[in-house]
Image (tube, rainbow, N blue to C red):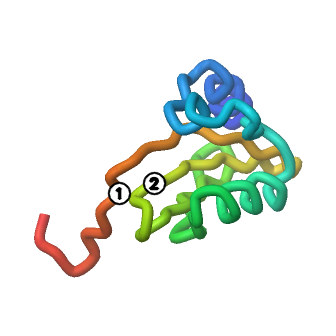
């Protein structure tokens, strides 16, 4: 739980290059609201999730058309925050590393 809280607290301090382009986007809030904004604005869709040791769920949203991506963290109590964002996403599934 401490790790989840630290992760979510840290997420508020990380610079968000995607948000520099549109400061009206939320950084934290209900998952459904954040996902809707990312889908409507950047055409991003969830592509994978993972469970962090402290119980937070990490979720990656990607737009293959635009190449943007967003990593969100969801705490067990339902609070969600955008951890980081980026561009130039490339799907490597099936390609050798």
Looking at the image, is 60 positioned above or below residue 54? below
Looking at the image, is 21 positioned above or below residue 94? above
Name the residue located 54 percent from the left edge and 58 percent from the top edge: 60
Q: Which mark is residue 22?
A: none
Provide residue 40's location: percent of width, then percent of height.
Answer: 70, 63
Quarter holding the C terminus is bottom left
Mark 1 surroundings within 10 Å by alpha-carbon count, few (fewer than 14), some (14 through 19), many (20 or more): some
Residue 50 in sight here:
no
The one of 75 and 87 positioned closer to us in this rendering: 87
Name the residue located 22 percent from the left edge and 80 percent from the top edge: 94
The outermost residue toward the top is: 13
What residue sits right under mark 1 in the picture?
A: 89
Name the residue located 51 percent from the left edge and 42 percent from the top edge: 85
Element under disc 2: loop
Mark 2 surroundings within 10 Å by alpha-carbon count, few (fewer than 14), some (14 through 19), many (20 or more): many
Q: Which mark is residue 68?
A: 2
Provide residue 24's location: percent of width, then percent of height.
Answer: 76, 35
Looking at the image, is 33 positioned above or below residue 86? below
Quarter location, residue 37: bottom right
Q: Is residue 50 left or right of residue 36?
A: left
């Amino acid at each position: 739980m401490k790790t989840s809280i630290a992760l979510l607290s840290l997420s508020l301090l990380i610079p968000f290059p995607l948000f520099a382009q549109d400061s009206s986007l939320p950084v934290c809030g209900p998952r459904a609201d954040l996902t809707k904004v990312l889908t409507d604005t950047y055409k991003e869709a969830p592509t994978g999730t993972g469970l962090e040791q402290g119980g937070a769920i990490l979720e990656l949203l990607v737009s293959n058309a635009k190449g943007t991506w967003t990593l969100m963290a969801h705490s067990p109590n339902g609070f969600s925050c955008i951890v980081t964002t980026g561009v130039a996403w490339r799907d490597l599934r099936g390609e050798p590393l």
